[in-house]
Each structure stands twice: as structure tokens, then as C-alpha cells.
């Protein structure tokens, strides 16, 4: 069990407390490190504390092993904080112990502290089907199973981590309040009748994907991953830049293609798309096979002029 935030303090108050240690006017102490952890899990404050430890001579850095480890016990941290802590742990000889603590937190069932200016929690769950969620208690959700189905949940949190899931289904969701949605590399995903997908979703490593009746108004470009099939059916507000070149089979039906300006495919244009793509759209095909219609080839060449 990690250190709970028993006496919450604002980011500015912690920053003021750490200022003399950041400036090198004083050497940080174990009591100061503990006070930071008891007060916050905000990334900027945690980063400043660890960087103050880095300023110490190596023999004194080793005294802060417990503080560095507790930074990751039941607490989520961004990558830059991981990097600082790993550097401290390697120099201090407790790198394997730190890796163990990080792994245990990543798979811990229940609530863990998120990186936030105020104490907020992520629910890490082994459930596979979600039809409701207590957004008043949790600002984050991480699913610890290979499959996940989220259907018509009215109160999704701002942070959703599905990086443990190889198969994902999201149905009937308005994702307006979701700021971060993380997916696993090579996952298979189906998103149906969803609105306001956050534009920071990384689809570039998704293996197979189906977007059905979704609104992509937040996307300037859509770059999908590599796999067997990509289905975009009845998609609204399709972005002008569309890269589907990682897929052997592409299904693009019922979408408004009039605003499409760049389309990248692995294989020749399917016949049903020939008359749907505007002349102003630049089409790039990675491998043009021998069966490609010559008039279509000429049309493609003209668009590159």
C-alpha cells in the first residue's frame, strides 16, 4: 500500500516549498520528499521533487530509495517521471525493485492515484462489460482484461486506458468528456455510433478497425494502422487526409467523400470508389497491380501533376 494523500496541497504551495531545493540553496531531505507525496501526485510537483534528489551527491541519492519507490506505488506517472526515477534507481542499485513496483501498480485491481493537481483516482478493473460507471468517484478507467465492451455508458471518465485489451468494442457513446483514450498496439477495435471521438486517439497501430456511424469532426487527418481490414461505414465529418495504406481490404461506404483531399491506399481503388472520390483528391497507391483499369491509372497520374 502506497502513501495516501492525507494533507492535500495546491501545486503552487508545493512549488514554493521546493523552490530553495530547486535553486540549490538547500539539500532536499527525506521529510520534504514524504511531505510532497502526502500532499499531491501532480506531475510537475513530483518531477521537481525527483529532480531535487538528482542534484544530490550519489551517496545521498541512495537514501531516497523509499521515496522514489513510493512515487510509483498505487500511483500513475507520465513517461518523463518514469525516466527520471529509472535513472535514480539504476544509479542507486534498485532498478529491478522499481520495475517490480511499476508493474504491480499497472496490474493492481482497484483504485490508483492519477497524475493531477487534485487527488483523483483511476479505477483499474477486471470487468469486460461496462454499462455504467461511477464518474463522481473516478476520473479514470483502465481495463485489465483482453476484451472490453463499453456500451451506452452515460458518465464515462476523462481518461480511459485500454492498452491491455486486444479486442475493444465501444457502442453508442458521446465521448465529449473523454480527453484521453489509449489503445493497445495491434488491437482489434469496433467503434459504433459514437460522437466526439477525441482527436488524440492513436489509431496508427490498430490491427483491424471498424468505425460505423461515428462522427470524426475533431480529426484533421486519420491515419490507421496495419492489418487485414479497415471498415469506415457511414462515417460523418470524414477528415480531408485519410491514410488506409496498411490494410489489405478497405470498406468505405456511406461516408461523405466530397471534402477528401488526400487518400493513401495499399491496393488499387475499389470499383465502387472510382466515382465517389472528387477530382481534387490526391490518391496514392503503394502497389498498383496488373489488373488495374488503365483509365483509372490515367486518372490517378493526372492527380499527381
Image (cartoon, rainbow, N blue to C red):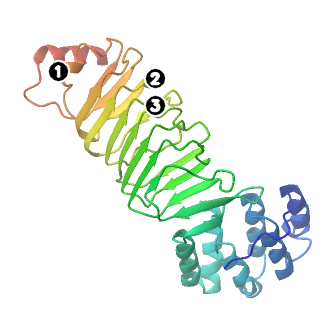
For the residue labelled by badge 2, is the local secondary structure a helix, a strand or a loop?
loop
Of 266 and 138, nearer the camera is: 138
Picture quadrant where residue 281 is located: top left
Q: What is the distance, in whole Å, between disc 3 and disc 1 at their CAs? A: 24 Å
Disc 3 or disc 2, which is closer to the eye? 2
User: What mark, if any, has residue 221 been given in the picture?
Assistant: 3
Q: Nearer the viewer, residue 241 or 117?
A: 117
Q: Nearer the viewer, mark 3 or mark 1?
A: 1
User: Between 44 and 253, which is closer to the camera in this rendering?
Assistant: 253
Q: Helix or strand or loop: what does disc 1 sit on?
A: helix
Foreground mark, 1 or 2, reads 2
Q: Which mark, by number, is residue 138?
A: none
Is residue 305 at all visible to an observer of this figure? no
Is residue 74 rendered to the left or right of residue 41? Answer: left
* Crowd around label 2: few <14 · some 14–19 · many ≥20 (10 Å): some
Residue at image point 17% right, 21% down: 271
Quadrant of the image occupied by residue 283: top left
SS class, disc 3: strand
Examine the image and state in which quarter residue 34 appears: bottom right
Q: Earlier in the sequence, mark 3 or mark 2?
A: 3
Mark 1 or mark 2: which comes first in sequence? 2
Quadrant placement of the C terminus: top left
Can you give x and y, in whole percent of width and height, for residue 56 in the image? 78, 78
Residue ID at (38%, 18%): 256
The image position of residue 132, as x and y in percent, is: 54, 50
Q: Is residue 85 above or below residue 239?
A: below
The disc label shown at residue 271, or none: 1
Q: Are marks 3 and 1 in contact (CB under 8 Å)?
A: no
In this figure, which residue is indicated by the disc labeled 2? 237
Which quadrant does the N terminus fall into? bottom right
Residue 150: image location, x then y, percent:
46, 48
Amino acid at each position: 500500500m502506497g502513501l495516501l494523500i492525507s494533507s492535500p496541497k495546491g501545486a503552487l504551495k508545493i512549488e514554493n516549498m521546493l523552490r530553495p531545493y530547486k535553486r540549490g540553496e538547500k539539500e532536499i531531505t527525506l521529510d520534504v520528499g514524504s511531505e510532497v507525496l502526502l500532499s499531491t501526485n501532480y506531475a510537475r510537483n513530483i518531477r521537481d521533487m525527483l529532480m531535487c534528489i538528482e542534484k544530490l551527491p550519489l551517496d545521498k541519492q541512495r537514501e531516497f530509495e523509499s521515496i522514489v519507490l513510493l512515487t510509483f506505488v498505487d500511483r500513475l506517472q507520465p513517461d518523463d517521471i518514469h525516466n527520471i526515477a529509472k535513472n535514480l534507481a539504476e544509479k542507486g542499485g534498485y532498478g529491478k525493485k522499481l520495475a517490480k513496483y511499476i508493474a504491480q501498480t499497472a496490474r493492481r485491481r482497484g483504485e490508483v492515484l492519477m497524475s493531477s493537481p487534485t487527488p483523483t483516482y483511476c479505477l483499474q478493473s477486471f470487468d469486460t462489460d461496462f454499462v455504467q460507471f461511477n464518474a463522481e468517484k473516478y476520473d479514470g478507467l483502465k481495463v485489465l482484461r483482453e476484451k472490453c465492451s463499453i456500451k451506452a455508458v452515460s458518465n464515462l471518465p476523462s481518461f480511459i486506458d485500454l492498452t491491455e485489451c486486444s479486442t475493444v468494442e465501444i457502442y453508442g457513446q458521446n465521448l465529449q468528456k473523454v480527453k484521453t483514450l489509449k489503445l493497445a498496439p495491434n488491437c482489434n477495435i469496433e467503434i459504433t455510433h459514437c460522437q466526439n471521438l477525441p482527436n488524440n486517439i492513436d489509431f496508427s497501430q490498430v490491427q483491424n478497425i471498424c468505425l460505423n456511424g461515428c462522427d470524426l469532426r475533431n480529426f484533421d487527418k486519420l491515419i490507421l494502422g496495419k492489418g487485414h481490414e479497415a471498415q469506415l461505414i457511414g462515417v460523418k465529418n470524414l477528415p480531408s487526409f485519410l491514410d488506409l495504406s496498411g490494410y489489405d481490404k478497405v470498406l468505405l461506404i456511406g461516408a461523405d467523400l466530397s471534402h477528401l483531399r488526400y487518400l493513401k491506399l495499399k491496393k488499387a481503388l475499389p470499383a465502387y470508389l472510382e466515382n465517389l472520390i472528387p477530382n481534387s483528391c490526391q490518391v496514392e497507391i503503394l502497389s498498383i497491380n496488373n489488373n488495374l483499369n488503365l483509365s483509372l491509372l490515367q486518372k490517378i497520374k493526372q492527380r499527381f501533376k
